[in-house]
Image (cartoon, grey):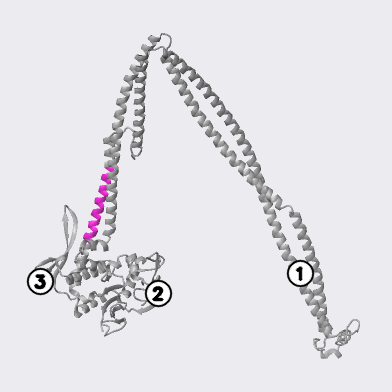
């Protein structure tokens, strides 16, 4: 399989490499492109922008990786970020193949996640199992729903706080209404005392009349606003209809101005003129064609070279002999027996042919002119039809605008009548207020001041009630699913049922996640020991991934190894070389369990950890697990100058 790299890693320009099934051993001195070649293949299995950035040559803005005729990845640097063409076909989006985790599984390189975590002594078995199985997506759903649960808890706390505040305000409103009733009793007592003291005026009745007049004025003002809204609405409709009429009228006037010099009849007359001319040209051309036929036949008869040979039986048949006599000799006219020069006939044929050709050109010119006139006439007819339609629209718009103008006038009249009525009611209210003021002057100052204070207190309570009511409306309006009058306890219980349902879903997802992780652990435990031993490793008698359960839930995974002596160790207590060995075993196990058909397994420089015999046994094992096994190793510059690929074990 051919691998083509352009501006990838340390390769500038286009470079081609041949990969063969089985073992591909890539050797070169440092900085000669080993990692660049392997990163190019990794780029085909990745959708990570960090990988793209590490793959594209630092001095180039574009590059590509092509593997065979099927896989391709184009890279482009845009605003200091490297992006991939989403239309390319890569391992990452291979149809009908779940190869999305191939980058995490099939690439054992210094920059792979497993190697980096081992190097930092931070390798987490649970995180590894989680990332290559379906558990990672479930865990993402769990985190998302737990976030939703926290948000809903906060929202519920805010809603309950708002509802509590609203219910406190409602209690305060009830208390203030009770106070208002008491104060209204005091007002009645004071008004009774004032009435007794004045003896001439029923101030309560006058006050009620004033209040009634004020309410009538408020109602009329509301009607006035409604009338003004109607006037405005009809005015807007009238303006639109008038604007449409004016625009259509301008279009029609513009058309009529432009069409003064054009008419369908003029086009038809011009067309008839050209048709007559073409007909005349055709008559003359037909006559010329007929004459050309005559001259052409005469050319054949009069020309000795063109005349057919006389038959041998001419002397035996009197009729044939007479016909030959009538034909005359070549070059002699059979009618008048005059001379007929061949050159003259030939020249006449040419002149007739040229004249006929000229007439044909003129006829085609007339036909083209007729086509143009027909097209212009058709266009004019369509424009006339269009402008007639606009005339109809203009007439309708004019009728509509006139009707709307009448409506506007009627609404204005209604509005003016309401204004007049408001003026009358206002005058009546002013008279009542004067009467009330005149009557109140005779009341003792102390009683009047006390009455005013009580009324001010009532007004203060009423204002506070309105403010509290508005605040209650605001608080309850922001609470979803709340019914006015619903108790705080009922609402809280209703919302908590929703939270409980979300908690159940989270617990279900956690069960599903644990089931997925436990299944993955079982798959790993089934084959990691076999892989370890078949690759020739003997340090550990047994390797097993163990689970740690806290309060009935999985909290972590660990890899525990057992030595021949029976001693057990955790993964984190092993040496770096032993951890790398187990990391390689885990990745090979993951490939066998999750992506057995993925054609590549790549090891970059990490084989240096193993001795030659161990490296060979690893490659022999991998040669049966992947179509293409790529292993890189550095060599001193004294042994080799450039990168080379060796196939197989020899």
Q: For the residue labelled by badge 1, is the local secondary structure a helix, a strand or a loop?
A: helix
- On the image, which quarter does residue 302 sit in? bottom right
Visible residue check, residue 45: no
Q: Magenta stretch containing residue 592, yes or no?
A: no
How far apart marks 3 and 1 lie (CA) works out to: 111 Å
From the image, give the main secondary structure of the stretch colored magenta. Answer: helix
Which residue position is annotated with label 2? 69
- On the image, which quarter does residue 299 sit in? bottom right
- 1 or 2: tag closer to the N-terminus: 2
Q: For the residue labelled by badge 2, is the local secondary structure a helix, a strand or a loop?
A: loop
Q: Magenta stretch containing residue 510, yes or no?
A: yes
- Front in this rendered view, residue 21 or 636: 636
Residue 160 lies, in percent from the top left, at 28, 38
How far apart marks 2 and 3 lie (CA) works out to: 50 Å
Residue 549 lies, in percent from the top left, at 16, 56
Which residue position is annotated with label 3? 564
What range of the chain is rendered magenta?
497-519
Residue 514 lies, in percent from the top left, at 22, 57
Residue 587 lies, in percent from the top left, at 24, 69
- Residue count near mark 2 (Cα–Cα under 10 Å), binned few <14, some 14–19, many ≥20: few
- Residue count near mark 1 (Cα–Cα under 10 Å), binned few <14, some 14–19, many ≥20: some
Name which residue lies at 44% across and 16% down.
437
């Amino acid at each position: 399989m051919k691998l083509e790299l352009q501006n990838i890693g340390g390769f500038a320009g286009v470079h081609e490499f041949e990969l063969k099934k089985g073992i591909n051993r890539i050797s070169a001195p440092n900085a000669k492109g080993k990692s660049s070649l392997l990163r190019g293949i990794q780029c085909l299995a990745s959708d990570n922008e960090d990988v793209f950035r590490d793959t594209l040559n630092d001095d180039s803005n574009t590059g590509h990786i092509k593997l065979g005729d099927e896989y391709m990845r184009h890279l482009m640097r845009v605003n200091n970020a490297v992006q991939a063409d989403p239309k390319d076909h890569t391992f990452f989006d291979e149809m009908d193949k779940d190869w999305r985790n191939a980058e995490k599984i099939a690439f054992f390189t210094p920059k792979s996640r497993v190697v980096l975590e081992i190097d930092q002594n931070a390798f987490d078995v649970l995180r590894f199992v989680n990332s290559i199985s379906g558990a990672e997506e479930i865990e993402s759903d769990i985190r998302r729903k737990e976030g939703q649960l926290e948000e809903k808890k906060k929202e519920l706390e805010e809603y309950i706080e708002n509802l509590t505040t609203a219910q406190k305000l409602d209690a305060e409103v009830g208390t203030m209404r009770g106070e208002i009733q008491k104060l209204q009793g005091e007002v009645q007592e004071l008004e009774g005392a004032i009435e007794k003291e004045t003896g001439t005026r029923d101030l309560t009745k006058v006050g009620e009349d004033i209040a009634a007049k004020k309410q009538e004025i408020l109602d009329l003002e509301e009607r006035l606003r409604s009338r003004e809204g109607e006037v405005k609405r009809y005015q807007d409709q009238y303006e639109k209809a008038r604007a449409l009429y004016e625009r259509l009228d301008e279009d029609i006037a513009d058309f009529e101005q432009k069409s003064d010099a054009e008419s369908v009849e003029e086009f038809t007359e011009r067309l008839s003129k050209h048709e007559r001319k073409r007909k005349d040209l055709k008559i003359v051309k037909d006559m010329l064609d007929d004459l050309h036929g005559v001259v052409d036949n005469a050319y054949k008869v009069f020309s000795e070279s063109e005349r057919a040979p006389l038959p041998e039986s001419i002397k035996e048949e009197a009729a044939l002999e007479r016909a030959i006599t009538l034909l005359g000799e070549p070059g002699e006219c059979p009618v008048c027996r005059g001379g007929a020069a061949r050159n003259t006939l030939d020249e006449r044929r040419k002149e007739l042919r040229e004249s006929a050709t000229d007439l044909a050109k003129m006829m085609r010119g007339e036909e083209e002119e007729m086509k143009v006139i027909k097209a212009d006439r058709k266009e004019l007819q369509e424009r006339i039809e269009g402008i007639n339609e606009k005339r109809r629209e203009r007439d309708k718009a004019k009728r509509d605008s006139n009707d709307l103008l009448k409506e506007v006038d009627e609404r204005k009249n209604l509005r003016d009548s309401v204004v007049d009525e408001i003026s009358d009611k206002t005058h009546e209210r002013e008279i009542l207020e004067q009467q009330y003021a005149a009557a109140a002057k005779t009341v003792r100052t102390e009683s009047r001041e006390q009455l005013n204070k009580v009324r001010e207190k009532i007004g203060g309570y009423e204002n506070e009630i309105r403010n509290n009511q508005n605040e209650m409306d605001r608080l309850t309006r922001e609470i979803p699913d709340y019914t006015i009058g619903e108790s705080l306890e009922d609402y809280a219980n209703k919302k908590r049922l929703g939270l409980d349902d979300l908690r159940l879903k989270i617990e279900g997802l956690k069960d599903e996640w644990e089931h997925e992780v436990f299944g993955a652990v079982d798959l790993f435990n089934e084959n990691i020991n076999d892989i370890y031993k078949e690759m020739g490793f003997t340090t550990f008698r047994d390797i097993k991934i163990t689970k740690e359960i806290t309060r009935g839930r999985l909290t972590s995974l660990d890899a525990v190894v057992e030595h021949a002596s029976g001693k057990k160790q955790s993964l984190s207590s092993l040496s770096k070389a032993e951890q790398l060995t187990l990391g390689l075993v885990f990745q090979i196990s993951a490939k066998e369990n999750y992506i057995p058909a993925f054609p590549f397994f790549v090891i970059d420089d990490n084989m240096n950890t193993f001795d030659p015999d161990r490296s060979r046994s690893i490659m022999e094992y991998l040669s049966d697990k992947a179509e293409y096994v790529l292993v890189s190793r550095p060599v001193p510059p004294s042994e080799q100058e450039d990168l080379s690929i060796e196939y197989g074990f020899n």
